[in-house]
Image (tube, rainbow, N blue to C red):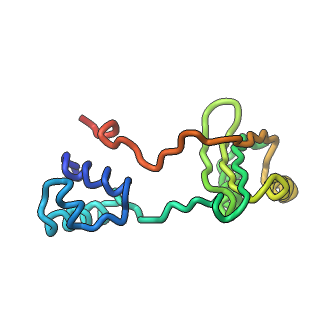
Amino acid sequence: MKLDKIDIKILSELQKNGRIPNVELAELVNLSPTPCLMRIKRLQAEGYITGYSAQVDVSKLGQTLTVFTEITLKNHHQNDFARFLQTVAKIDSVVECHLVSGGYDYLVKFITPGISEYQTIMERLIELEIGIDKYFSFVVLKSPIVKSYLALDDFVHK
């Protein structure tokens, strides 16, 4: 499916506010409500919109620690990567996991209540013998820029 400028505008607005009423969204993208809703349903059906969620400020609930961890695996066979991912995917504190190029294999983002909880998770991962050779932890001191949306026009094939 090829997206037009209105589709991109709908996606952009929904990124900023997934709870925007259809009437308001339709007005912002210069459509009447029914065609706007039809486009949203089409974008969902085609997989452009994968879901809706609330952005929660976890720090309001209590202390948090964000850690980026570089992880290198001992072996690089397909089953080694699969075993690692299968285990890490089950850890609630893992909010992102990226296979990367460069000097290590994965960059994993953890959000935990504190350093001891993070260290417990890492010790458990090592004990499970899922193929971790080494890891390096980077504790986030401050996150001055965190965006929850992208400028979608930059990604559209022209």
Locate residue 20: give its quadrant.
bottom left
Is residue 71 something that shows in the picture?
Answer: no
Left or right: where 37 falls relative to 44: left
Q: Position of residue 107 (x, y in %)?
A: 66, 43
Direction front: furthest residue = 60
Residue drawn 40% across and 62% down? 50
Q: In this view, does 127 lie above or below 105?
A: below
Label tally: 0
Q: In which quarter of the image is residue 89?
A: bottom right
x, y (%) of residue 127? 87, 57
Q: Which residue is drawn at 67% across and 47% down?
A: 108
Q: What residue is at 61 percent from the left and 38 percent from the top?
A: 100
Q: In this view, does 74 lie to the left or right of 4?
A: right
**Residue 116 appears in view:** yes
Q: Where is residue 34 in the image (x, y as percent from the top left)?
A: 14, 69
Q: Residue furthest top?
A: 102
- Indicate the quadrant where residue 101 lies: top right
- Quadrant where the image shows the C terminus: top left
Nearest the viewer among 39 and 21 is 21
Q: Position of residue 25 (x, y in %)?
A: 24, 60
The residue drawn where x is 79% and y is 41% is: 135
Q: In screen coordinates, is 97 left or right of 26?
A: right
